[in-house]
Image: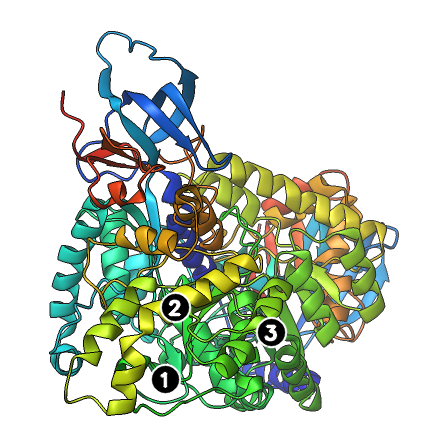
Amino acid sequence: MRKLCYALALVLACCVGMAGRASLAQTPSTTPLPQTYIHAGRLIAVPGDAVKTKQTLVIRGGSIAQVLDGYVTPPETAVVIDLKAMTVLPGLIDAHTHLQTTLGPAAFLKNLTQTKVGYAFDAAANAKKTLLAGFTTVRDLGGANEVIFGLRDAIAKGQVPGPRILASGHQVHAVVKGGQNNVTAVQCSGADECTRITRRQIEAGADLIKVAISGGEPLTGSLVPLIVLFEDEVSAIVAAAETLDRTVACHAFIPETISLCLRAGVHSIEHGSYMDDKTAKLAKQTGAVFVPTLSIGPVMQNQAKTYGLDPARADAFSADMLAAVRIAKKRGIPIIAGSDSGPSAHGANAFELVRLVEAGLTPAEAIQAATTASARYLGLGDMLGALEPGKAADIIAVDGDPLSDITQLQDVDFVMRGGVVHKAP
Amino acid sequence: MALRLIILAVGISAAMLALAPLTFSQTPPQTYLHAGTLIDVKAGKSRDAQTIIVTGGRISDVLDGFVPAPDGTATIDLKDGTVLPGLIDAHVHLLMNLGPQLQIKFLTQTLAEATLDGVVNARATLMAGFTTVQDLGGKNDAIFALRDGIRAGKVPGPRILASGSPITPLEESFNRSCSGVAECRRVVRDQILQGADVIKTLVGGGIQFGGGLPARFSAAELDAIVKTAESMGKKVAVHAHGTDGINFALQHNVHSIEHGTYLDDTSVTLFRKAGTVLVPTLMAGQVVEALAANPAAPPAMRAEAASFTRRLMAAMARAHKGGVTIVLGTDAGAGEHGKNALELDLMVRAGLTPMEAIQAGTVAAAKHLNVDAITGVIEVGKAADIIAVIGKDPIADVKALQAVDFVMKGGVVYKGGQD
């Protein structure tokens, strides 16, 4: 179902775009070029496979039509984009964003005064930053239903520039301030109510369910759970989601809460900063993937002082997160890139790949975590994550070689999404 | 990580910062206390001629002899005194003042009035030498604001851990009710989210309200309450008088029985098995006895009420003999605020030694309240919660603690200490 929605969205976007003629201007256009040839100096078509040089990508109607050896001369009607001096790769995927959120001291006040419309404008601005940073798809894990679903649909229609969005909308918690009137979260107690709330979320437009099992929050210094759902409740959420072809992402930090989510059958562990070997083994059994959101470590370190938290604890947390990735990698748990932008900076999403390399992934593995592996996990592997005929023309390019220096991805020079150029060198 | 998480983190860290100096007046950088006798509640014995050094609100050293302070550092002379940790009362109602009008007041008192009463009662409690209390029943916003206001140094008072509204099967008074497992989970979760440090619930009615329905949660509901509280790192304190209710609660591993009037030998076994503590609230017996004088009360209730302190004492003695941990709690609010130390005298009359009574109101209470990392003993690293009586020996006569001469909380002197 989810796949179908996206396929439809693509088709729609293409149809809308057929009328006009596009330019390479930086201003976002809704118009995919009718036929585009990209001359790629170096091409990482399928991250993990060998890099090819001097390649031509033929793009038609928002999708990749052909990948050819050499710099093929296009017909007169086609546009040529010269990326001969660059490394070309698939658009990146960030599996954990909060587009409507901008964390900082002002956010506390903003939470009290900002309307949903205000959040929608913030989200649109952050979506554009994210896209221009080379992230052509995101999975947004927590924001107001109306805001993020509205933005998702507007981007799909080409009304505003931004990445493709899969969105959870409201997060599901055991209990939230304001109860059912909370702006960004819903609460449920008891399996029946958790089933109902899951169905309501999906009815409202959620592409997946985000459940937050709190506890062991990194800076409290306490490994005592704060707000937890019980296993019967998370199991009910997973069952309800699965019957509607949705996945469940679980926010959890410590082995106890990670295990609870895994036993309940969630599809991904978000953060998971204190994952230990036993938990990793369980994840291997259940088949869940791991989105370690390493970018928030340095955010915590920088902001510890602002929030009156212990800087030493923030330092330890930032390092502990890396250890969790090493444990997961050793156990063969799929690791997926997710920056937790919102708490971390929008548009700095590629820092997550830098952190993954710091944790011990090779640059190639880090790129796969944001392309092929991520697309496969999101159920969009036939559409996204690689540059092959039939896949969406989500293409980025950088000057240097990200396979030897991952930081090259922090400065993306070219961004095409669905055949539309959003950034050109 | 949601924004919520950060907010939570900040909120919780505020709670974790209870160790930080708590300034009502300015916390002095360093103070030397010369203690004639220091009661070591952990070891259960006293040591003569000790120097306690308090730095930044915490105890930084405890030395033998009267060590002179460096120039410019204040010394508090308690050479003629007996010094002990600030006392802890595990059962108070700071927002309540029982009197003939209590029930009417419950119905008519606004939140603001309750808060103001709480400010006055908190001060009286602190001045009586009680530097930490657990408030087991008061309107949510008022008691949480009082707790946080004292922590922030806005008004003087003891450290407070608070349950806020009790959770009950019936919608009585300011209680929150729940029916069914799912709703009981939700109410406990919401109560903790609103700020509860502990969950208070009732099994059976309150004696003082005689004639109330002996309401009781189902086993599944009580189990849900305990498990949900524990999942959030909190304890469950259960008001129970009757044998069946006490044993029912103990079978569900609640963390304390408050009152425990008719506990029996089965209860004692269950207490020990579950590791549950008894908070006997002997002073509440005196309040109940006062009701016996009320001709308007039903005769059966008057008869029962007349012997209530004796019954509570017998229950405590039975539990103590059976190896149950006894923690001091007065039910102040039902009784008068600021007289909390009378409970120690009643505990001694019921069979504890003065040292055991003091331990029940310091080290044992701190452990039960999960504040033993912060207070309850005088040792390095703990908050400087220190009290003293001058010219009297509470180990010889525990009544001495009913008039404390010196009160320091978090390094700030609230009573005595002048040269």
Q: CA distance from mark 3 to mark 2?
A: 17 Å
Q: Is residue A260 visible?
A: yes
Q: Position of residue A225 (x, y in %)?
A: 55, 60
The C terminus of chain B lies in quadrant: top left
Residue type pointed to by label 2: Leu
Q: Is residue A78 above or below residue B34?
A: below
Q: Give left or right: position of B37 versus B294.
A: right
- Point out residue A234 in the picture as x, y percentages from the top left corner: 63, 78
The answer to which quarter of the image holds residue B280 is bottom left
Q: In the rendered view, would you say A414 is above or below A386?
A: above
Secondary structure beneath label 2: helix
Instruction: Specify the label residue B297 is tagged with.
Output: none
Earlier-in-chain disc, 3 versus 2: 3
Residue at the spot x=50%, y=39% of the render? Answer: A301
Identify the subunit bearing mark 3: B
Q: Earlier in the sequence, mark 3 or mark 1?
A: 1
Q: Which residue is mark 2?
A: B312
Q: To which chain does the residue with label 2 belong?
A: B
The chain that hosts pointer 1 is B
In this rendering, is residue A345 above or below A265?
above
According to the image, label 3 marks what residue?
A: B266
Disc 1 target residue: B205
> Looking at numbered disc 1 in the image, what kind of residue is underneath it?
Gly
Residue B401 sits in quarter: top left
Locate residue A345 relative to residue A362 in the image: left or right: left
Counting residues from the N terminus, which is met first, the one under dot 1 or under dot 2? 1
Q: Residue at x 79, y 54 (%)?
A: A44
Q: Nearer the viewer, residue A222 or A368?
A: A222
Q: Secondary structure at mark 3?
A: helix
Q: Is residue A188 visible?
A: no
The amino acid at mark 3 is Thr
Residue B57: image location, x then y, percent: 32, 31
